Image (tube, grey):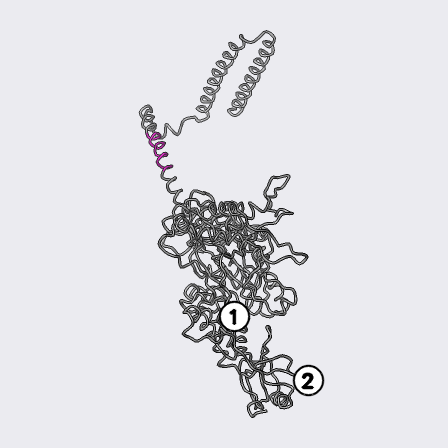
Amino acid sequence: MTELTQNIMIKDLIVPEQDSELKEASIVILIDPKEDEVFVISLGEKTKPKAMSYRLLLEELIEGKVKKGAFEKTEYWKKVEESLDDEARAQRDIKFEVIKPLVENLSLFLRKGSYGKGLVKNCLEFAKENGLKKTTRYQVYQWLYRYLKCRSNKNCFLRKPGTGKGKDKNYSNKTGPKRQEGNVCNGRMRDELDNKHIKSIVREFHECDFPIPITDCWIEYKNKHQCDPVYDQFTGEFLKYEKRKGELFLSKHQFLQYAYSLTSANRHRVLKAQGLFDEYNKNIKGLSGEIHEIFGDAPGSDYQVDETPLAIELVDEFDRNRRLGRPTCYSVIDMFSRAWVGLLLTFAKPSAHTAREIIFISCRNKEKFCKEIGVELNEPWLPESKPARIHVDNAEFASALTDAFSADANIEVLFNKEGNSQEKGLVERRHKTLEEFLFGRIPGAISKKYVRNYLARRVRRNAVLNIRELYQILIDFITRFNKFYPLKTLPLSKEMKEDGVKNIPNQKWLWGLVHRAGDLQSVDEDELFMQLLESAQVTVKRDGLFLQGRYIRTFKKRRTSQGLHYTCDWALNNFVYEKEVGKTYDCKFMRYSMSRIWIVTDFGFQEAVLHADDASFKWWSAECIQDKKIEEANEDEVQMEQYHEEQSKTAGYAKAKVVDARKEQDQITVNSANSQDLSFNREQAIDREIAESQIQLNKTTNQNYHEEKDIDDKSSSKQVQNKNSLTKETATLFATKRKMSKRRRG
């Protein structure tokens, strides 16, 4: 054995012979004699570096238990730079640059317990910055291991000769792997009739003025051609779509492959239909967001909060012909489970009030919240209680949160750096998810991805929903998202997978409450009211409690609206309306729903609801009430002007009659006017009234008498009897009236 064969060196191929600790042929990748360690990597397919005793391996080499082997490079590993085309060289070099930090710090990466100290994360960041956004940790490890097995030759990343060169292959017509029980495929080949159906769906829902994404076209295709609608047999109400049984259907991949080929082939017609000739909209791609890699290690530890105007036009709740514009949507996302924990729709601009309310909503019980806004909760909305931290935009909330809630709320606020909204990419993408769901389904919804500005006017014209109806739709959407949606980007640990946790937000949230408890803060309603709700004062009136308009107004340069009236059972039972008129009480209220307020008393919070005078504003927000109050006040002013204009005619007529009457009246002195016998004058007036009534009676009876002559003989006696009874009753009435008059005079 030569001197070189007696030593172990980096990149040596070590092959086990017999009775060796080494089981497979391996490459030496790192030697540390001081620590008595040598790292080797097996040439097997699924292996990772293994640490051995350097002295033991050296002894086995000397004893012949292992030996050095020859390592023959393949042809494509031997290629020189000049023989490579630019594309192959670029692909090879970018993969090597991704793993370069690990290669340069291999000792740190291989040490047990350190595992690189963030080196792999740096590799992933570099990959994303250079176009390899789907790169995973597993891929980074495999690239590194491949590089080490090839004795640190970058050409290991080149494509093997003969691969990827096939032509006219159409695997997308097939549906994937075979079933376990036999050789029958999980579907069938796509035929011409399927292509015809796909083309019709794409033209109907995508190549139109109001298109929906191709991925949503798949749902429309499946409902129409692979499912049957199910209706209630008694009410006729649509219930669901049910997949047909006993048939083989196309897969989603088959549909998307052909649908995307259609849109590519007819790109000009698609752009013309969608108004996208000039530019590619910058909002097509969602933001990735990286802050969740640092925060959000437990349910309730970190919430992301953001607001954005939803791309949908709404109408007034009383008048569907009156457009109100786009509402602002506030969303709160739990960074641990990716679940929606709060949602607020409002027409108000960002302020301390809106900041306070969205945090309040995210902390409290969602069933009570839905009752307050008049929405039915069809699915459980699990997340509640206070978080440890919230992450918000600096520009939007920095000043607002200063006065939003009290310091003892124990919620830490972290602000993003200005211009770095991608740090909260989780909640940014959720707003895009909401808009994509609404567009193509709800009239008045606009998509920047598909609709140009000059086409948006036609879309806005179709607005029909009010804010209450939109609330119902969005809350149904987010609760079902939390409960059922398999979120591919939801990170699950090994422990979660061992416990059977699926990548569904609610499942991870519930698992975290048991195994990652400690950050979510339990809190009751009264505590939330004191810390997060806005304060005001109500004044006791005879008929209830009055909240002045200055408390619910938004700070705009226009007149203050009138206040709201409330009734309270506690105040009624304790005779507050009678004993304490004019006294003021502190109260707490929520701007998103003014249906009820809470009076602060020595006996705790007492609920007050809208008075009957203002009951029409049930479930309305403060800004909507203010707008409506101002509108009603303006209408009242117009109506009052019309009223005074009409009553001026009455006043003019009265004035003219006074003038005419004075002409007929003789001039008398004050003494003669006051000395007249009023009783005698009233008696004469009553006698004239009776005489006029008698004349009217005679006219009526004579008219009835002449009409009765034309009646048949069979009914004449009955009619005459009725006439006589009527005459007697009338005569009796006048006789009684005259007796009472004489009695008063006597």
Contact between marks 1 and 2 (CB within 8 A): the answer is no
Q: Mark 2 sits on what residue?
A: 19
Q: Nearer the viewer, residue 69 or 458?
A: 69
Measured Cα–Cα span from mark 1 to mark 2: 46 Å
Q: Earlier in the sequence, mark 1 or mark 2?
A: 2
Of the pair 199 and 618, the residue shown nearer to us:
199
SS at mark 1?
Answer: helix
Percent x, y of residue 18: 67, 84
- Quarter holding the N terminus is bottom right
Using a 10 Å C-alpha cutoff, classify the residue at mark 2 as few (fewer than 14 neighbours), some (14 to 19) or many (20 or more): few
SS assignment for the magenta stretch, majority? helix
- The amino acid at mark 2 is Asp
Q: Is residue 269 left or right of residue 178?
A: left
Compared with 198, 680 (above or below) is above
As drawn, the label of residue 503 is none
Q: Is residue 553 left or right of residue 184?
A: left
Q: Amino acid at mark 1?
A: Glu
Does the magenta-highlighted stretch encompass residue 322?
no
**Disc marking residue 293:** 1
